[in-house]
Image (cartoon, rainbow, N blue to C red):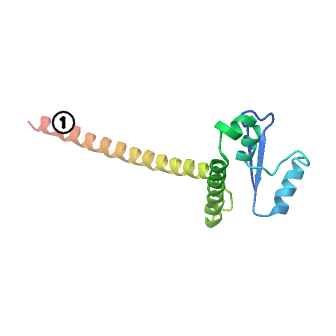
Amino acid sequence: ILIEVDHLQDVPGPYIQIKGVNKDAVAAAGSMLKLDGSYTTKSYLELILERLPAIERNSGGIHSQQSARLQEIVEFIQSQGCSSTSESSSSRVVSPIEGIIEEMQLRIRRLERWLAINTVLWTFFMSALVGYSLYQRRRQ
């Protein structure tokens, strides 16, 4: 189960999403959070479209064809986030953003490791160079 709490513009309270494969587990999580009767099954896009003034919704705002396409994109992105986590061996549900963050952290750790290795090698190389230079001076 993944529980996300977001704050949307022009929405008075927090927007809570409970995602999971098992509907009973999701319902139980909603009950434990005492969300009974205070929740909606609407997506972000539906909430935003409802909050638009009627003039913007009909004429100059988002057209129904555009909103349908946006809804498809949102659902596709959400399904990709869920399917990618179910394919992995990890038991923890990871959102696409968390996956990107973990990948960046992994890259940073690799770079830090290479930095440490390079620092040690440069220190060794410079020590050898200084040592050889001092050896040559004493020999003369």
**Mark 1 burial class by Cα count in 10 Å: few <14, some 14-19, many 20+:** few
Answer with left or right where residue 14 lies relative to residue 139: right
Measured as percent of width and height from the top left, residue 128 is found at: 24, 43
Q: Kindly give the residue lying farthest to the left in the view shown.
A: 140
Q: Nearer the viewer, residue 73 or 120?
A: 73
Residue found at x 78% / y 50%: 42
Instruction: Say which element carries label 1.
Output: helix
80, 137: nearer the viewer: 80
Residue 129 in the image, given as x and y percentages of width and height: 21, 41
The quarter of the displayed image where residue 51 is located: top right
Judging by the rendered image, the residue that carries numbered circle 1 is 134
Q: Is residue 3 above or below residue 127?
A: below
Measuring 51% from the left and 48% from the top, which residue is drawn there? 104
Q: Quadrant of residue 28?
A: bottom right
Question: As shown in the figure, which amino acid type bears the numbered disc 1?
Answer: Leu
Q: Please state the horizontal and vertical placement of residue 40, each as a whole percent of the image.
A: 83, 48
Residue farthest toward the front in the current orientation of the protein = 59
